[in-house]
Amino acid sequence: MDIYRAIADRTRRAILDELVDRSDQSLFELCARLIMKHGIGSSRQAISQHLDVLEAAGLIRTRREGRSKLHWFEGAPLKAIGERWPIPTDEHTSHSTDEDNET
Amino acid sequence: MRINWTSICVDDQEKALRFYTETLGFRLKHNIPLGEHAWITVVSEEAPEGTELVLEPAGHPAVVPFRKALVEDGVPYTAFAVDDVEAEHERLVAEGVRFVQPPTDLGTVITAVFDDTCGNLIQIMEEKAQP
């Protein structure tokens, strides 16, 4: 799974948004945030599968806290995008980046 | 028909009784020995005549994988209502309680999740006043 496919989905981007907001979340907390803050009412199994995709792309990692499994955002793979298509520094572009209403 | 009792499975009834009374602040209502175990219930100090929480021994073999799966995914076994999640979080952390989810604003409610040390995660929830 490459990162482009991993982030080409609104629910998976919302998951990353929430993990940036707070690291180390359980599946339960992520599902609660997705439904309450994003109106994404997918089943726990569906969210779990999204997490598997993100983990396979290296965009999230998990660790154990006690007997709970917690997820955190790993931004390193996204550097590849900036390295492949570097943003010229002397340019002031101010395009809106609010694109999360698509897909 | 009335909902007078609700129950939670605990690893160790005596340990659970200490946690639910001394740490959480509930009041012991019944402690009736029944052979190997006891019928133990606690109530809220704010509603001593209200619903009783039964501290049920986690004896059935099916309880083990059931609770393990819930804890793994961070799913609370049950939830309690509080007036102020932030204040309860602060109080319980000072008592040494481990939270797996700190107070989180979810729009209409604020929630937090802690470990009851008896094999369960518990959610506390504050309903926000509607504007």
Image (spheres, coloured by chain):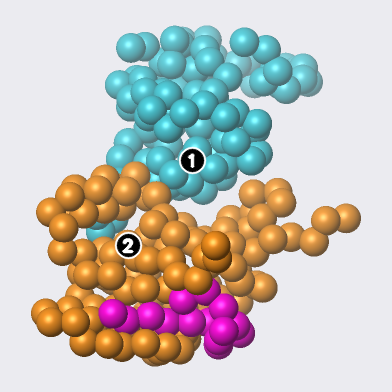
Chain colours: A cyan, B orange
Q: Which residue is mark 2?
A: B120
Residue lying farthest front?
B1
- Residue visible at 33% across and 12% down in the picture: A1
User: Given the image, on which type of amino acid does mark 1 rest?
Assistant: Leu
Q: Is residue B130 above or below residue B10?
A: above
Left or right relative to A69: residue A80: right
- For the residue marked with disc 2, what is the amino acid? Asn
Q: Residue at x 16, y 58 (%)?
A: B60
Q: Give the letter of the chain under mark 2.
A: B
Helix, strand, or loop for circle 1? Answer: helix
| Residue numbers of the magenta segment | B39-52
Would residue B98 appear left or right of A42 to someone viewing this image? Answer: left
Disc number at residue B24? none
Characterize the local packing of mark 2: few (<14), some (14-19) or many (20 or more) Cα atoms within 10 angstroms.
Answer: many
- Give whichever of A33, A16 is nearer the camera: A33
- Residue A102, given in percent of the width and then of the height, sits at 67, 12
